[in-house]
Image: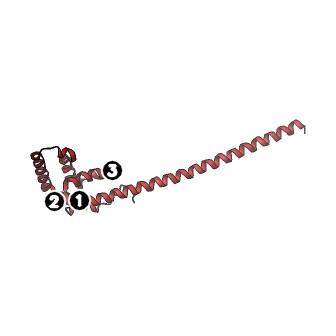
Amino acid sequence: MSPLLIVLLVIAVLIVAALGAYALHLTRKVKEQETRQRAEEAEAEQQLRQHQLGLIQDVHFVCKAVITDQCEITEGVLRLEYLIRGLDPDVWNAAELNTLRHFYSLAREMPILDAYKNLSRQEQFRLDKHRWDLEETHKDNILRELQWLVEYRFPAVSLVH
C-alpha cells in the first residue's frame, strides 16, 4: 500500500470517528431535551389539574354558600357563570342549568360595586327590590340546580379524572 493511501484511510477513519462522536453528542442532547420537555409537560399537566380541582371546589363552595343563605342568589349566579365557563363551558349550557342561565341573563347587567354606589338611594332601592323579586321568583329552581351542581363531577374535565 502506498503511503498516500494509508494517510487518506487514516484521515477517512478520523472523519468517520469525529462524525460518529458528534452524532452521539447530538443524540444525547436530543434525549436530554426530550426528558426535560416530558418533565415540563408533566408539571404543566399537574398545575392544570390543580387549577381545575380548585375551580370545581370553588363551584361547590359557591353553590353551598347560596343553598345555606351565606351568599345571595344574584352574587352566587354571577360567580358561578364565570367559574363554570372557565372550567367546562358545555356545563353552563346543560339543560339542568336553564334557570341559572336565565337568571344570569337578567342579572348580569345590574350595576355592582362603584356603579351601584353611584346610583341614587331611590335607584338603589328600586334595583334591590327588582333583584329580590327575581331571586324570590326563581329561588326554588335555582336551589335545585345548585344542588345538581354540588353533586356534578365534571366528567369532561379530563385531567381531574
Residue furthest top in the image: 4
Residue 110 visible here: no
User: Which residue position is annotated with label 3?
Assistant: 86
Q: To which quarter of the image does residue 142 belong?
A: bottom left
Q: Position of residue 84 (x, y in %)?
A: 30, 52
Looking at the rendered structure, the kind of residue marked 1 is Leu
Looking at the rendered structure, the kind of residue marked 3 is Gly
Callout 2 secondary element = helix
User: Which residue position is annotated with label 1?
Assistant: 146
Q: Is residue 141 above or below residue 15?
A: below
Q: Quadrant of the N terminus?
A: top right
Q: Position of residue 2 (x, y in %)?
A: 90, 37
- 81 displayed left or right of 13: left
Circle 1/circle 3 CB separation < 8 Å: no
Question: Which comes before the other along the chain, label 1 or label 2?
Answer: 2
Between the residue at mark 1 and the residue at mark 3, the CA separation in whole angstroms equals: 17 Å
Residue nearest the observer in this picture, 59 or 129: 129
Looking at the rendered structure, the kind of residue marked 2 is Asp
Q: Is residue 121 above or below residue 52?
A: above
User: Which residue position is annotated with label 2?
Assistant: 140
- 28 displayed left or right of 100: right
Between the residue at mark 1 and the residue at mark 2, the CA separation in whole angstroms equals: 10 Å
Question: Badge 1, how many Cα within 10 Å: few under 14, some, many 20+?
Answer: many
Q: How is the image coloured?
A: secondary structure
